[in-house]
Image (cartoon, rainbow, N blue to C red):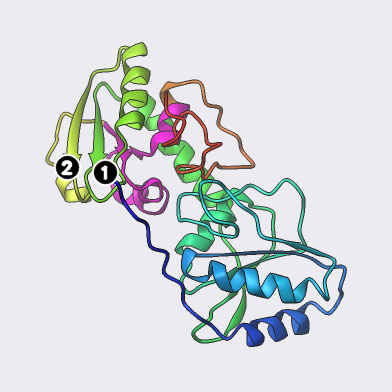
Amino acid sequence: IETLYVFVEIKIDTQHLIDTVKLNFPDPNTKLAFIGTIQFTGALQSVRSTLSQYYTNLLLPQCKSLSPGEVLGCTSCRLEEANDAIIYVADGRFHLESMMISNPHAVFYQYDPYSKVFSRESYNFKEMKSIRKQAIEQARKATKIGIILGTLGRQGSPAVLKHIEILLRNKNVPYVVVLLSEIFPAKLDLFKEIQGWIQIACPRLSIDWGASFSTPLLNPYEATVAFGDAKWEEHTYPMDFYSKSGGSWSVYNAK
């Protein structure tokens, strides 16, 4: 079915954002990167155009298939070069945290276009990595795995499901596939014989809420580490679920 995607753009007070950036970063040689949710990418383009007259090094990172500057909760760029600050323009932290996970050593600020508050933000990357590594190690010991294919929107990917099934078959790990629109601890606890889960829905569900489940709940990347050939790297964590340059666990490159 042919589908027309309609971008929704929210107008903000770009002049206030520009003044805020110049006030907090008076040195024109400051290296700045701007990111935000899709509703504000138009504003980011405008702000960058104006600030380029003052700053010598501005960046709108792009992680295709996303728009320049756009980030998702499960998809964001890993910046190759260091920036003095990454400025996130949007409300809430969910999508911002994706970029913080991708770039754990970067310095982040958030500009809320509604409250016009400019704040320094941080993320406990070390704790997250420790919790997820434990979940992977526990899942490796499971005698039977449950694979959840999400049915909410476009979260569930048949290609990623096939990738996970191949991994488990190659390791001779018994598994069962379950289709769910929502994933709750109490619902998964009904499957008494399942000792570990792999969910193909929202990768952040495992990262943010995995510790709330009684059995390990891995996302596709973590499953590829546990049962495939992906390496667990201590100083990074890929957020590339919808990236065209993502790993074998991502939507565009699952195989």
Reading the image, the residue beneath label 2 is 189
Residue under the point 48% across and 64% down:
38
Q: Secondary structure at mark 2?
A: loop
Q: Is residue 141 visible?
A: no
Let me know if residue 223 is in the magenta part: yes
Residue under the point 51% across and 52% down:
66
Left or right for 151, reference 27: left
Task: Name the quadrant containing residue 67.
Answer: bottom right
On screen, residue 59 above or below 156? below
Q: Which mark is residue 4?
A: none
Which amino acid, mark 2? Asp
Q: Secondary structure at mark 1?
A: loop
Which of pointers 2 and 1 lies earlier in the amino acid sequence? 2
Q: 10 and 117: which one is in front?
A: 10
On screen, residue 239 above or below 96? above
User: Residue 5 in the image: x percent, y percent?
Assistant: 37, 57
Residue under the point 47% across and 56% down:
72
Query: What distance separates the C-alpha of mark 2 from that of mark 1?
Result: 7 Å
Q: Which mark is residue 214?
A: 1
Which amino acid, mark 1? Ser
Instruction: Write down the region rendered in magenta.
Output: 196-225
On screen, residue 175 above or below 30? above
User: Residue 114 in the image: x percent, y percent?
Assistant: 49, 84
Label 2 CA crowd tier, 10 Å (few <14, some 14–19, many 20+):
some
Mark 2 touches mark 1? (CB < 8 Å): yes
User: Residue 71 in the image: x percent, y percent?
Assistant: 52, 57
